[in-house]
Amino acid sequence: MKVKNKNTLFISLLFFLITIGFFIGFILKDPYGDFMNEQKFKTLNSYKDVNLVFYKKACPYCKAGKSEIVKNIKSSKVNSYVINADKKEGLEIAKKYHVKYAPTMVVIRNNDYKSFLYAHDKGKKIVVEKRKIKEAFEK
């Protein structure tokens, strides 16, 4: 009888540890996956035609705009870098381009830049600036 209880306890503990491992992996996963990031951007020598998409993991505006951003990154020829504003490197880049809020996109053309919020509040809803996003991904 004691062996059965030990086996049950062992299996329960193993299941618990595996569940915790998956949960931690999900939380730590970068929401933009394999797109070019802040570390790759810092290695650039020329900033001629580049888009910088700033985000934070916990930002509801960033989450709202993510699918539109990803869709345009995949279909665009403009090099785009997804910058995590929670990281030290991301904060340094944000400071360089005077980014104040995470859901900001910086459009760099011919070493000049402009920025805009790709998602924001309008009334009590979060609005994603689909037209502005699309224009930013056109050369």
Image (cartoon, rainbow, N blue to C red):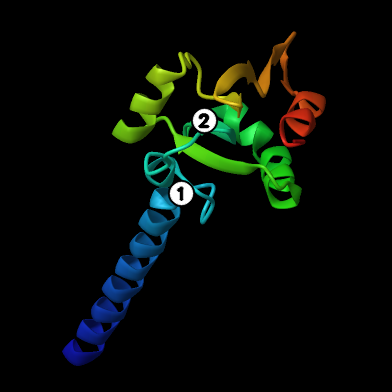
7 up-or-down from 69: above or below: below
Q: Residue 22: give x, y in percent of width and height.
A: 41, 63
Q: Residue 138: give x, y in percent of width and height.
A: 77, 36
Image point 30% across, 67% down: which residue? 17
Residue 30, labelled with which disc? 1
Q: Is residue 87 visible?
A: no
Image point 34% across, 60% down: which residue? 20
Mark 2 surroundings within 10 Å by alpha-carbon count, few (fewer than 14), some (14 through 19), many (20 or more): many
Which is more toward the observer, 60 or 41?
41
Q: Judge from the rendering whether residue 80 lies leftward or rightward of residue 14; answer left or right.
A: right
Q: Judge from the rendering whether residue 19 lies leftward or rightward of residue 120; answer left or right.
A: left
Tell me the kind of residue under disc 2. Answer: Phe
Residue 87, labelled with which disc? none
Residue 54, labelled with which disc? 2
Name the element at disc 1: loop
Image point 40% across, 27% down: which residue? 93
Badge 1 vs badge 2, beta-carbon distance below 8 Å: no
Image point 31% across, 80% down: which residue? 11
Name the element at disc 2: strand
Q: Judge from the rendering whether residue 12 lies leftward or rightward of residue 40; answer left or right.
A: left
Dot 1 or dot 2: first in sequence order is 1
Q: Residue 86: give x, y in percent of width and height.
A: 37, 32
Which is more toward the observer, 127 or 43?
43
